[in-house]
Image (cartoon, grey):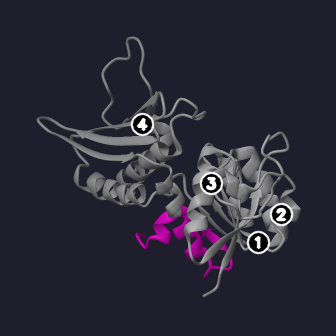
Amino acid sequence: MTIQKIAIAGSAGRMGRALLEAVTRAEDMQVAAALEMDSSPFLDQDAGSLIGSNNDIRITSDFESALQGCDQIIDFTRPEGTLKHLSACRKAGVKMIVGTTGLSDEDKAQLKAASEEIAIVFAPNMSVGVNLTFKLLEVAAKVLNQGYDIEIVEAHHRHKIDAPSGTALRMGEVIADTLGRDLKKVAVYGREGVTGEREDTTIGFSTIRAGDIVGEHTAMFAGSGERVEIVHKASSRMTFAMGAVRAARFLQGQSKGLFDMQDVLGLR
């Protein structure tokens, strides 16, 4: 059995700790590096102590040095951090699993360019259940393609800084692509005041930020006399971390290219 050596970006954060735990549990992987920002108070601490163990891996902000000897990095940080890591991984030939949200079209273009040299899995949500939901939305949109208004409602914890969530936007993209619409032209982000009647082709988004909600997404197809809702609720960040572990296993067999969780799960 080949052991994959994994670096964890943002290792001291809420998601980073879940990733540390998931990789530590995996028999075919090991945490080889734990990365944080220069300003982190956790620098030089044992990364294992963050999850109640000891792995003798010191948290560092020296990305390029830490990547030496690593096979892959899992990055659920912020766009500016992810792009910095992307450059270092490209130089070092380290594969990437990117769950960062809020990336611009230009940022995504950089991922695409880098994928000509290294293998990358990029997905706004790595939960297996969420990615199954994307597939269900495609089926629903094909069937409910006339006479149904489409709304997407998402809820996350109070600390999330981007809205709508990357998952909600991906849900909208899946539906719009299936219906032959351009999401950038038909999306409506919140409503206030006298808005007039709803246009038939729009896809609405509503955002909730409160408490410690891990992640909830509802896609609503509302017609005359009935409503179909496809709902996913996450109760633990571990679901995203376990999806990232599956992505790491998938990348082991890839030398270059840009993939998503639909590829990882064989849903394409």
Asked whether the beta carbons under mark 1 and mark 2 sit within 8 Å of each other, the answer is yes
Where does the image place residue 262, in percent across and percent down from the top left? 46, 66
Q: Which residues are magenta?
A: 244-268
Q: CA distance from mark 3 to mark 1?
A: 23 Å
Local crowd size for mark 3, using a 10 Å CA cut-off: few (<14), some (14–19), many (≥20): few
Q: Which of pointers 4 and 1 lies earlier in the amino acid sequence?
A: 1
Which mark's residue is nearer the viewer, 3 or 4? 3
**Residue 186 locus on image (x, y percent):** 43, 37
Neighbor class of circle 2 (other Cα within 10 Å; few <14, some 14-19, many 20+) is: some
Q: Nearer the viewer, residue 243 or 108?
A: 243
What kind of residue is marked 4? Glu
Badge nearest the viewer, 3 or 2: 3
Q: Which residue is mark 2?
A: 66
Give me the disc on residue 52: 3
Q: Could you say whether the residue bearing mark 2 is in a helix, strand or loop?
A: helix
Front position among marks 4 and 1: 1
Query: Label 4: which residue?
Result: 154
Going by the picture, which residue comes out furthest to the left? 225
Residue 92, numbered label = none
Q: Callout 4: helix, strand or loop?
A: strand
